[in-house]
Image: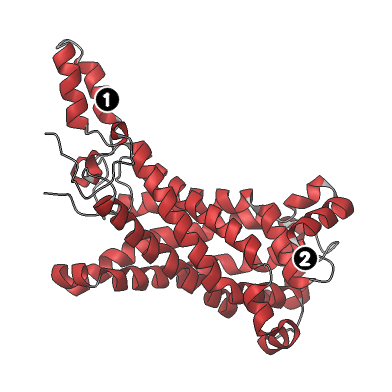
Amino acid sequence: MVFPEPPSRLPWIPSYLYSSALTSMSLVQNQNESMKDSCHHVSSFMIPSPAESRIPMHSPMYYAACTAGGIFSCGLTHMTVTPLDLVKCNMQIDPAKYKSISSGFGVLLKEQGVKGFFRGWVPTLLGYSAQGACKFGFYEFFKKYYSDIAGPENAAKYKSLIFLAGSASAEVIADIALCPFEAVKVRVQTQPGFARGMSDGFPKFVRAEGPLGLYKGLVPLWGRQIPYTMMKFSIFENIVEAIYKYSIPTPKDQCSKRLQLGVSFAGGYIAGVLCAIVSHPADNLVSFLNNAKGATVSDAVNKLGLWGLCTRGLPLRIVMIGTLTGAQWGIYDAFKVFVGLPTTGGAPAKQ
């Protein structure tokens, strides 16, 4: 069946990106009836609907796959942007020395060489892998859980509230997993000579501040990550639904993998920019508290000021978080596709 393009939509997306699997199969069969294997290959390029998935939706295997996707999406992306994160943290802690993005990279290069740009990559990889596992896995769980409590009618009517509640619940758990690694990462990145990385930094941190010291920044971390994640998931889901509803004249389940993953990246990038702005004051607090022993929130406010809390290091964080969030959604949905699941979000199939 061919879906005509509605007159109200601009044809700015190439048609080959959303041509249906059924249309592709029909064309191949018309050319040569004996090429059934080739036709099967073409149709397998399309993302399967939940009914065609090898993994039952909302089964233990489904949540395990989402958890694994979260590990890849968060751990790898955060590790990749370690140089940006390193400069950002130092700009927040020592703005007199690290005055701007360019000068910050120059100072690090001069003092520590190229290797210095990746200081703290191990706690970053481990911490955000653990966070990503909990964030994405529990989000999928809580989204279904709250939808079941609300019932089909209310779940559809108040879907944004369900996205917000599900993501907030997941992030509470995810930050408990992340917090110890984040504490060590910030100390390693902002105090030269403290430690080389995770292996020597973790025991040194515990000896200096005790095991509970690893969770000193948990409340500010919640303050940073919970609003960030609520924005990240809710805005993403709504943007993706709007793209499929208003910009693409073909049902989502008949769009190509390339187009669906492109939509995931675009929705993630836009959501990431807004996330960075909302969560930035708490990000400054986390960096300040984990860098100075015995420091309090009032100390951070007195030293940085309210304007400094909201703006110091913000341009760099917008670039970093926008790119990182877009990449996370792209990787997460690519992994879901790899195991036979549909991508996240999207409008209901058009009639």
Query: Looking at the image, which residue is at 62% across and 48% down?
Result: 80
What scheme was used to colour the molecule?
secondary structure
Label annotation for residue 33: none
As rendered, which of 332 and 183 lies closer to the eye? 332
Q: Is residue 82 above or below residue 165?
A: above
Dot 1 alpha-carbon crowd within 10 angstroms: few under 14, some 14 to 19, many 20 or more:
some
What is the x, y in percent for residue 233? 40, 63
Query: Looking at the image, which residue is at 44% across and 49% down?
Result: 265
Q: Is residue 288 left or right of residue 221?
A: right
Determine the image quadrant of residue 103.
bottom right
Dot 2 alpha-carbon crowd within 10 angstroms: few under 14, some 14 to 19, many 20 or more:
many
Q: Is residue 88 visible?
A: yes
Query: Looking at the image, which residue is at 44% across and 63% down?
Result: 232
Q: Quadrant of the image for the N terminus?
A: top left
What is the x, y in percent for residue 218? 58, 76
As rendered, which of 175 and 14 lies closer to the eye? 14
Q: Is residue 216 visible?
A: no
What is the x, y in percent for residue 125? 61, 53
Determine the image quadrant of residue 86.
bottom right
Q: Secondary structure at mark 2?
A: helix
> Mark 2 or mark 1: which is in front?
1
Q: Secondary structure at mark 1?
A: helix
As rendered, which of 159 and 106 lies closer to the eye? 106
Q: Is residue 343 left or right of residue 1?
A: right
Q: Which residue is mark 1?
A: 42
The three-letter amino acid code for the residue at tag 1 is Val
Label annotation for residue 190: 2
Q: Are marks 2 and 1 in contact (CB under 8 Å)?
A: no
What is the x, y in percent for residue 271? 45, 61
Q: CA distance from mark 2 to mark 1?
A: 51 Å
As rendered, which of 64 and 217 lies closer to the eye? 217
Query: Looking at the image, which residue is at 46% across and 69% down?
Result: 171
